[in-house]
Amino acid sequence: MFSTLTDQGFDLATTNHAAAILRHDFAGEAAALAAALADFRVSMAELIGGGGGESGQTQRLRHALHDAGWRKHRFHVQTIVDGTEREGISHEVDHVRFAAPGALALEVEWNNKDPFFDRDLENFQRLHALSAISVGIIVTRGASFQDQVRDRITDWLFQNALSSEADLDRLGIGDRTARQKSRVAAQVARGTPFHEAFANAFTADKFGPSTTHWAKLEDRIRRGVGNPCPLVLIGLPMGILTDSTPVAPRDRGLFDA
Protein backbone atom coordinates (compact mmCIF):
# COMPACT_ATOMS: atom_id res chain seq x y z
CA MET A 1 0.00 0.00 0.00
CA PHE A 2 2.77 2.42 0.97
CA SER A 3 5.59 0.40 -0.59
CA THR A 4 6.56 3.33 -2.82
CA LEU A 5 7.19 5.42 0.27
CA THR A 6 9.18 2.79 2.15
CA ASP A 7 11.29 2.22 -0.98
CA GLN A 8 12.11 5.95 -0.90
CA GLY A 9 13.20 5.80 2.72
CA PHE A 10 10.07 7.10 4.42
CA ASP A 11 9.47 5.94 7.98
CA LEU A 12 6.13 4.19 8.32
CA ALA A 13 4.25 2.71 11.27
CA THR A 14 0.64 1.72 11.86
CA THR A 15 -1.36 0.86 14.97
CA ASN A 16 -4.69 -0.73 15.83
CA HIS A 17 -5.29 -2.37 12.42
CA ALA A 18 -4.97 0.92 10.53
CA ALA A 19 -3.21 -0.80 7.61
CA ALA A 20 -6.08 -3.28 7.16
CA ILE A 21 -8.66 -0.50 7.34
CA LEU A 22 -6.90 1.52 4.66
CA ARG A 23 -6.30 -1.50 2.44
CA HIS A 24 -9.91 -2.63 2.44
CA ASP A 25 -11.94 0.56 2.89
CA PHE A 26 -9.73 3.43 1.72
CA ALA A 27 -7.43 1.98 -0.93
CA GLY A 28 -7.92 4.87 -3.35
CA GLU A 29 -7.47 7.54 -0.71
CA ALA A 30 -4.31 5.84 0.60
CA ALA A 31 -2.88 5.63 -2.93
CA ALA A 32 -3.53 9.34 -3.54
CA LEU A 33 -1.84 10.21 -0.25
CA ALA A 34 1.18 8.05 -1.07
CA ALA A 35 1.48 9.70 -4.50
CA ALA A 36 1.39 13.21 -3.03
CA LEU A 37 4.07 12.37 -0.47
CA ALA A 38 6.28 10.52 -2.95
CA ASP A 39 6.39 13.59 -5.20
CA PHE A 40 7.10 16.07 -2.40
CA ARG A 41 10.49 17.80 -2.56
CA VAL A 42 12.14 20.74 -0.78
CA SER A 43 15.17 22.55 -2.19
CA MET A 44 18.05 23.36 0.12
CA ALA A 45 17.82 27.06 -0.73
CA GLU A 46 14.14 26.96 0.15
CA LEU A 47 14.75 25.14 3.43
CA ILE A 48 17.37 27.60 4.61
CA GLY A 49 15.73 30.68 3.14
CA GLY A 50 12.45 29.79 4.78
CA GLY A 51 14.14 29.55 8.15
CA GLY A 52 13.30 25.86 8.45
CA GLY A 53 9.69 26.66 9.20
CA GLU A 54 6.48 25.99 7.35
CA SER A 55 6.81 28.31 4.40
CA GLY A 56 6.66 27.51 0.70
CA GLN A 57 7.97 23.99 1.13
CA THR A 58 5.19 22.54 3.25
CA GLN A 59 2.55 24.78 1.74
CA ARG A 60 3.12 22.93 -1.54
CA LEU A 61 2.44 19.65 0.25
CA ARG A 62 -0.69 21.09 1.84
CA HIS A 63 -1.90 22.34 -1.53
CA ALA A 64 -1.28 18.91 -3.07
CA LEU A 65 -3.30 17.27 -0.31
CA HIS A 66 -6.06 19.86 -0.71
CA ASP A 67 -6.21 19.18 -4.45
CA ALA A 68 -6.51 15.44 -3.72
CA GLY A 69 -9.56 16.08 -1.53
CA TRP A 70 -7.91 16.40 1.90
CA ARG A 71 -9.60 19.60 3.13
CA LYS A 72 -9.58 21.44 6.45
CA HIS A 73 -12.61 20.51 8.50
CA ARG A 74 -14.06 21.51 11.84
CA PHE A 75 -15.96 18.72 13.61
CA HIS A 76 -18.61 20.15 15.92
CA VAL A 77 -19.86 17.95 18.76
CA GLN A 78 -23.12 18.91 20.43
CA THR A 79 -24.40 17.11 23.53
CA ILE A 80 -28.10 17.13 24.40
CA VAL A 81 -29.23 16.02 27.89
CA ASP A 82 -32.99 15.71 28.49
CA GLY A 83 -33.67 18.02 25.61
CA THR A 84 -31.20 20.66 26.78
CA GLU A 85 -28.19 21.44 24.65
CA ARG A 86 -24.85 21.62 26.43
CA GLU A 87 -22.01 23.78 25.24
CA GLY A 88 -20.63 22.39 21.97
CA ILE A 89 -17.03 21.36 21.38
CA SER A 90 -15.16 21.79 18.10
CA HIS A 91 -12.24 19.75 16.81
CA GLU A 92 -10.44 21.22 13.80
CA VAL A 93 -8.25 19.02 11.61
CA ASP A 94 -6.10 20.48 8.84
CA HIS A 95 -6.72 17.66 6.33
CA VAL A 96 -9.78 15.41 6.26
CA ARG A 97 -10.72 13.03 3.45
CA PHE A 98 -14.35 11.92 3.44
CA ALA A 99 -15.30 8.71 1.65
CA ALA A 100 -18.22 6.28 1.65
CA PRO A 101 -16.81 4.07 4.45
CA GLY A 102 -15.93 7.01 6.72
CA ALA A 103 -13.33 9.75 7.16
CA LEU A 104 -9.54 9.95 7.37
CA ALA A 105 -7.95 12.73 9.43
CA LEU A 106 -4.40 13.94 8.74
CA GLU A 107 -2.07 16.46 10.36
CA VAL A 108 1.29 17.62 9.01
CA GLU A 109 3.74 18.43 11.81
CA TRP A 110 6.78 19.76 9.97
CA ASN A 111 8.35 21.92 12.65
CA ASN A 112 6.27 22.56 15.75
CA LYS A 113 7.03 22.03 19.40
CA ASP A 114 6.63 18.33 20.14
CA PRO A 115 3.56 18.71 22.46
CA PHE A 116 1.60 19.32 19.26
CA PHE A 117 1.79 15.55 18.79
CA ASP A 118 -0.19 15.11 22.03
CA ARG A 119 -2.82 17.55 20.75
CA ASP A 120 -3.15 15.74 17.42
CA LEU A 121 -3.25 12.23 18.88
CA GLU A 122 -5.72 13.12 21.61
CA ASN A 123 -7.89 14.87 19.03
CA PHE A 124 -7.86 11.74 16.86
CA GLN A 125 -8.72 9.64 19.91
CA ARG A 126 -11.80 11.73 20.70
CA LEU A 127 -12.99 11.85 17.10
CA HIS A 128 -12.56 8.10 16.69
CA ALA A 129 -14.50 7.44 19.88
CA LEU A 130 -17.35 9.48 18.37
CA SER A 131 -17.13 7.47 15.11
CA ALA A 132 -16.28 10.72 13.32
CA ILE A 133 -13.05 9.33 11.81
CA SER A 134 -11.83 5.86 10.92
CA VAL A 135 -8.06 6.50 10.93
CA GLY A 136 -5.76 9.29 12.12
CA ILE A 137 -2.60 10.07 10.14
CA ILE A 138 0.42 12.16 11.14
CA VAL A 139 3.16 13.23 8.73
CA THR A 140 6.37 14.58 10.28
CA ARG A 141 10.13 14.76 9.74
CA GLY A 142 11.59 11.28 9.57
CA ALA A 143 14.53 9.79 11.44
CA SER A 144 16.97 10.12 8.53
CA PHE A 145 16.03 13.77 8.05
CA GLN A 146 16.52 14.57 11.72
CA ASP A 147 19.83 12.70 11.94
CA GLN A 148 21.39 14.02 8.74
CA VAL A 149 20.03 17.52 8.13
CA ARG A 150 22.92 19.35 9.84
CA ASP A 151 25.54 17.61 7.70
CA ARG A 152 23.44 18.15 4.58
CA ILE A 153 23.22 21.90 5.25
CA THR A 154 26.95 22.05 5.97
CA ASP A 155 27.81 20.34 2.68
CA TRP A 156 25.39 22.46 0.65
CA LEU A 157 26.79 25.73 1.99
CA PHE A 158 30.34 24.58 1.30
CA GLN A 159 29.59 23.33 -2.22
CA ASN A 160 27.91 26.63 -3.12
CA ALA A 161 30.70 28.78 -1.59
CA LEU A 162 28.37 30.39 0.95
CA SER A 163 31.02 31.38 3.45
CA SER A 164 29.73 34.57 5.09
CA GLU A 165 26.62 36.46 6.13
CA ALA A 166 27.18 38.65 3.08
CA ASP A 167 26.83 35.60 0.81
CA LEU A 168 23.53 34.73 2.43
CA ASP A 169 22.31 38.32 2.19
CA ARG A 170 23.21 38.42 -1.49
CA LEU A 171 20.91 35.48 -2.13
CA GLY A 172 18.12 36.80 0.02
CA ILE A 173 18.52 34.17 2.75
CA GLY A 174 20.14 36.34 5.38
CA ASP A 175 16.93 37.60 6.99
CA ARG A 176 17.62 36.23 10.45
CA THR A 177 17.58 37.64 13.97
CA ALA A 178 20.55 39.31 15.59
CA ARG A 179 20.71 36.44 18.09
CA GLN A 180 20.97 33.85 15.32
CA LYS A 181 23.72 35.79 13.58
CA SER A 182 25.63 36.34 16.81
CA ARG A 183 25.63 32.61 17.57
CA VAL A 184 27.21 31.91 14.19
CA ALA A 185 29.70 34.77 14.63
CA ALA A 186 30.74 33.43 18.04
CA GLN A 187 31.56 30.01 16.59
CA VAL A 188 33.44 31.55 13.67
CA ALA A 189 35.48 33.63 16.12
CA ARG A 190 36.52 30.38 17.82
CA GLY A 191 37.79 28.99 14.52
CA THR A 192 34.79 27.08 13.21
CA PRO A 193 34.32 27.52 9.43
CA PHE A 194 31.26 29.60 8.57
CA HIS A 195 29.39 26.78 6.81
CA GLU A 196 29.77 24.53 9.85
CA ALA A 197 28.90 27.28 12.33
CA PHE A 198 25.80 28.23 10.37
CA ALA A 199 24.61 24.62 10.09
CA ASN A 200 25.20 24.03 13.81
CA ALA A 201 23.21 27.10 14.84
CA PHE A 202 20.48 26.65 12.24
CA THR A 203 19.67 23.03 13.08
CA ALA A 204 19.86 23.62 16.83
CA ASP A 205 17.47 26.54 16.49
CA LYS A 206 15.05 25.11 13.92
CA PHE A 207 15.24 21.32 14.15
CA GLY A 208 16.13 20.74 17.80
CA PRO A 209 15.28 17.60 19.77
CA SER A 210 12.14 19.18 21.27
CA THR A 211 10.50 19.83 17.91
CA THR A 212 8.16 17.53 15.99
CA HIS A 213 10.10 14.63 14.47
CA TRP A 214 9.92 10.85 14.23
CA ALA A 215 11.52 9.90 17.56
CA LYS A 216 9.19 12.19 19.50
CA LEU A 217 6.18 10.71 17.70
CA GLU A 218 7.34 7.15 18.34
CA ASP A 219 7.69 7.98 22.03
CA ARG A 220 4.03 9.02 22.19
CA ILE A 221 2.91 5.86 20.42
CA ARG A 222 4.89 3.64 22.79
CA ARG A 223 3.11 5.34 25.69
CA GLY A 224 -0.28 4.69 24.10
CA VAL A 225 -1.20 8.29 23.36
CA GLY A 226 -4.11 8.28 20.92
CA ASN A 227 -5.24 4.72 21.64
CA PRO A 228 -7.42 3.03 20.56
CA CYS A 229 -7.68 5.14 17.39
CA PRO A 230 -6.10 3.38 14.38
CA LEU A 231 -3.08 5.45 13.40
CA VAL A 232 -0.73 5.80 10.44
CA LEU A 233 2.58 7.55 11.11
CA ILE A 234 4.73 8.76 8.22
CA GLY A 235 8.22 10.24 8.48
CA LEU A 236 9.60 12.37 5.65
CA PRO A 237 13.14 11.18 4.78
CA MET A 238 16.32 13.06 3.94
CA GLY A 239 15.61 12.19 0.32
CA ILE A 240 12.97 14.92 0.06
CA LEU A 241 15.76 17.53 0.12
CA THR A 242 17.13 18.44 -3.27
CA ASP A 243 20.30 20.35 -4.18
CA SER A 244 19.41 23.46 -6.13
CA THR A 245 21.90 26.01 -7.35
CA PRO A 246 21.44 29.37 -5.62
CA VAL A 247 20.28 32.11 -7.96
CA ALA A 248 20.07 35.75 -6.98
CA PRO A 249 16.49 37.03 -6.45
CA ARG A 250 16.92 39.54 -9.29
CA ASP A 251 17.31 36.62 -11.71
CA ARG A 252 14.30 34.71 -10.51
CA GLY A 253 12.24 34.13 -7.38
CA LEU A 254 14.65 32.25 -5.13
CA PHE A 255 11.99 30.01 -3.76
CA ASP A 256 10.01 29.35 -6.93
CA ALA A 257 8.81 25.78 -7.10
Image (cartoon, grey):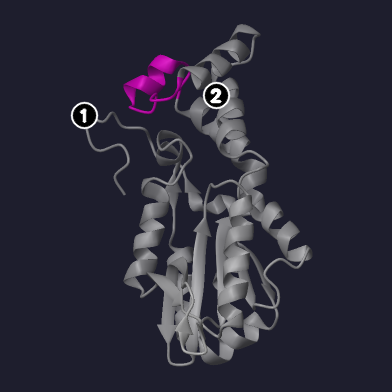
Marks 1 and 2, the one that precedes in the sequence: 2
- From the viewer's perspective, is residue 200 above or below residue 68? above
Q: Residue 198 carries which label?
A: 2
Q: Residue at x 47, y 89 (%)?
A: 83
Residue bearing mark 1: 250
Residue 169 horizontal side relative to residue 198, left or right: left
Q: What residue type is labelled 1?
A: Arg
Q: Quadrant of residue 192?
A: top right
Q: Which residue is drawn at 50% across and 59% down?
A: 108
Chain part drawn in magenta: 161-177
Q: Residue 92 carries which label?
A: none
Residue 108 horizontal side relative to residue 144, left or right: left
Q: Nearer the viewer, residue 148 or 75?
A: 75
- From the viewer's perspective, is residue 238 above or below residue 209? below
Q: In which quarter of the image is residue 59?
A: bottom left
- Residue 212 pos. (x, y %): 60, 50
Q: Which of marks 1 and 2 is in front?
A: 2
Q: What residue type is labelled 2?
A: Phe
Q: Magenta segment, principal secondary structure?
A: loop
Q: Which of 51 and 6 is in front in this view?
A: 51
Residue 228 in sight from this viewpoint: yes
- From the viewer's perspective, is residue 205 above or below residue 38? above
Q: Quadrant of the N terminus?
A: bottom right
- Residue 218 pos. (x, y %): 72, 60
* Residue 25 is inside the magenta segment: no
Instruction: Name the element at disc 2.
Output: helix
Q: How many labels does the image show?
A: 2
- Residue 24 pos. (x, y %): 57, 92
